[in-house]
Image (cartoon, rainbow, N blue to C red):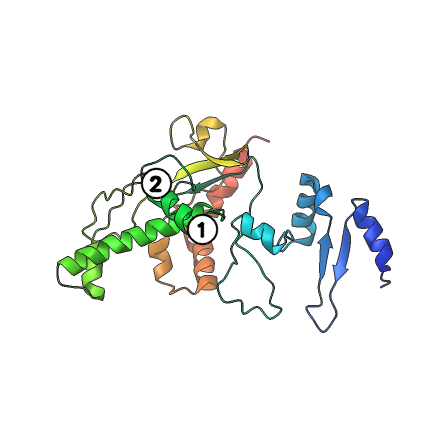
Amino acid sequence: MTLSPTPEIVADLKAGRMVILVDEEDRENEGDVVIAADFVTPDAINFMARHARGLVCLTLEEDRCRRLGLSPMVAANRSGMGTNFTASIEAAEGVTGVMPHVPFGTDVPGMRAIVDYHKQNHPNDTHDALYVRGWTYVSLWSEALRRADKAGELNGEGVKKATETLLNYDLGGLTGNVTYTATDHRPSTKVNIFIIKDGKLAITKTPNGENPLVTGGWPLLGVDVWEHSYYIDYRNERPKYLEAWFDNLINWAHVEEMFALAPK
């Protein structure tokens, strides 16, 4: 294989063309499809995802990551090459997803304490929805610890019992009211549907509040979000879990039938 000289590669990048950068054989011995960020288009991303596979990565300076609130993916980076991956990012517009909590800065009562803490301790940082999720976790566990301490059972079993007394616990709109019971440790079975609009997360709803079929969607495969009880049997053995999930839970004959009937 003939390698292109560096000036030629730089010229291609400046012209908006993709290039393939390859590693040394004794490093990772792989190639990456690269394009200058100024020239990225949906077609370019689709080409990378379809033909190169793997991760689609964006290179950012440390200061830019800090201003965007992009923290490292892991606290202790043990990657063989020390690659500084941040938390995953998504497109800036039009993407739809679900999450149980509201974005940072949403006008709900529970956000006031978060914003006050932010202003007092790190006013120059940018926070995302994960910051709110972390706050709700700490709030719930703090309440459980308070209840366990009040009952004189500040130990593992006592905290578990205290958690199971949370009934419609109000987190001030940061997420839905939370309920734990001795037989159900799912704090909530509801999520909001969000769409990225004008660079911000906004709650969106389907006309009937839950079913995308009314907007013209066509189901090929429906899966219960709460598969956790099934997962427990596999003790975090993810490959075995996925194999059993695909082989035992999905009615593939029905999927094929729905595919055949779907509008073309």
Answer with left or right where residue 26 lies relative to residue 1: left
Residue 153 rendering spot, x and y as whole percentages: 15, 63
What residue is shown at x 46% (from left), y 47% (from top)?
123
Residue 66 rendering spot, x and y as whole percentages: 54, 52
**Farthest residue toward the front?**
120
Do the residues under discs 1 and 2 have CB atoms within 8 angstroms? no
Return the disc, 1 or 2, that comes first in the chain's sequence. Answer: 2
Tell us which disc is closer to us: 1 or 2: 1
Q: Residues within 10 Å of mark 2 (few under 14, many from 20)?
A: some
Q: Is residue 18 placed above or below 160 in the rendered structure?
A: above
Asked whether 232 or 178 is in front, the reply is 178
Q: Is residue 46 placed above or below 185 in the rendered structure?
A: above
Residue 201 rendering spot, x and y as whole percentages: 48, 37
What residue is shown at x 71% (from left), y 64% (from top)?
30
Q: Identity of the amino acid at label 2?
A: Arg
Asked whether 168 or 222 is in front, the reply is 168
Quadrant of the image containing the N terminus: bottom right
Quadrant of the image containing the C terminus: top right
* Mark seen at residue 122: 1
Q: Which residue is mark 2?
A: 112
Residue 111 rendering spot, x and y as whole percentages: 35, 41
What residue is shown at x 37% (from left), y 44% (from top)?
116
In three-dimensional space, the C-alpha distance between marks 1 and 2, rounded to whole angstroms, equals: 15 Å
Q: Is residue 236 placed above or below 191 in the rendered structure?
A: below
Q: Is residue 63 placed above or below 97 in the rendered structure?
A: below
Q: Identity of the amino acid at label 1?
A: His
Q: Is residue 96 visible?
A: yes
For the residue labelled by badge 1, is the local secondary structure a helix, a strand or a loop? loop
Answer with left or right where residue 11 lies relative to residue 45: right
